[in-house]
Amino acid sequence: MLPPQPDLVSLSLFARSGMALHILLLLLLLAGTRNFMRRAVRRDTPFKRPGPVATALLVPVGNVTAQTEPGLRSLLEQDLDNYTVTLISRTGTEPAAQLIRRLCTEYAHARHVVAGEAGTCSQKNHNLLAAVAELGPEPEILVFCDSTHLARPDFLARLIQPIAEGGAKLASGYRFVQPDDTRLGTLIQMLAVQSIHMLYAIRPLSQPWGGATAIDRKSFQDNRIPDLWSRTVVDDYSMGPYLQGLGIRSVPVAEACLETHISGQSVRGAADWFYRQLQFFKYYTPFTWAAASILPLCYLGLIAWMAMALIAPAAMGDRADALLYVAALALIAPWYTSVIPNRAPLGRRVAAFFLFTLIAPVQLLRTWTSNTISWQSIDYRMNLSGGIEGITRRDRGQDS
């Protein structure tokens, strides 16, 4: 067998370095976020309960699923004094509005706002702005929350505690996925959500990114968040980097974590969900997004080299290194896939892990191919400053 050529020797050295770095980063991520993620899942760390500060919880309700009513009831039954819940629908006749009206008859602190159709921003942002406009002067803290996740009774108290007692201006929680089946798509989405969640534990990277966000009302108004939301597609992730540029950082609250039950997800559906999350990354932190795009190119190149080393060891001369790399990933997979407790068989979890490591870099590179975010049958044409340039409603064939 001929010895490897000098250029292949350099390539092999680069590949070995890449493999070692990838394994090291995974281990550091798991070890460095272990305590944060454990607190997020257990949600039982003792904390100082906030005083009776007036709090407004605003929840937009869109498509009604099996998770919507349990999620809303968990938010309506929070163990907190002096809080109100505003539930928002687009129209007064859709299924969401019917559910909201029924819940409002059961909970005296709940109210219904009909927002109407959005014109220059996403429907979710429009709904939230309509609800803020209907608030009286009393609320000192505003909380924006999704409707389809389960909250523990102390969720809201934990989320607002850094603002009510600690002097923070902005606080955020996230969520974890509890898979109700063992489909690969369901497990991949669990890992995608978990991977974003882990970034919360890394303070320079921590941003509000789904789940729930609390903000001091004065900061919300003084920093013109309504103006920002009136031209953007997402509420939390547009607000975080914007406020960070003004010197206001989000405080991540591990225990203010919602629980999402999903089942029946396809691999394609999980990939598309992750793609949309990475699009927010593109439009609201564009320089970080562009720099981060180098990583998937390197990783996919590493995968190609590894495949060649396994298929043609006579040419590459590195089959042992490739096998060692795969073995190391296989050993890490059970740890990575058990951060969120689940009952999936080990083989399914390992398969989901390897698929996710391939899907994630492809979806990040995919964000270079389009300037459109698609969400609930609506296409939003975006510019790189995060603003909406046009809206197409596919269900009605309308442009605006």
Image: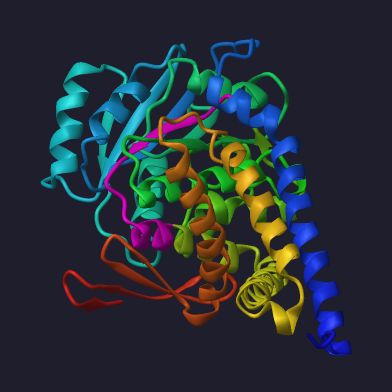
Q: Is 53 located above or below residue 288 in the figure?
A: above
* 300 lies left or right of 57: right
Residue extending farthest to the front is 1
Please say whether residue 186 is visible from this viewpoint. Answer: yes
Residue 57, placed above or below residue 133 = above
Is 339 in the magenta? no
Between 109 and 333, the one lying in front of the other is 333
Q: Position of residue 110 (x, y in %)?
A: 29, 24
Q: Magenta segment, which residues? A: 253-273
What residue is drawn where x is 66% and y is 55%?
A: 241
Instruction: State the residue in front, 253 or 93.
Output: 253
Which quadrant of the rendered structure holds the N terminus? bottom right
- Residue 71 location, quadrant: top left
Q: Nearer the viewer, residue 200 or 183?
A: 183
* Depth order, front residue of 223/163: 163
Decide: is 21 above or below 52.
below
Q: Residue sitting at 70 percent across and 27 percent down?
A: 35
* Residue at x 41% of width, y 16% of height: 78
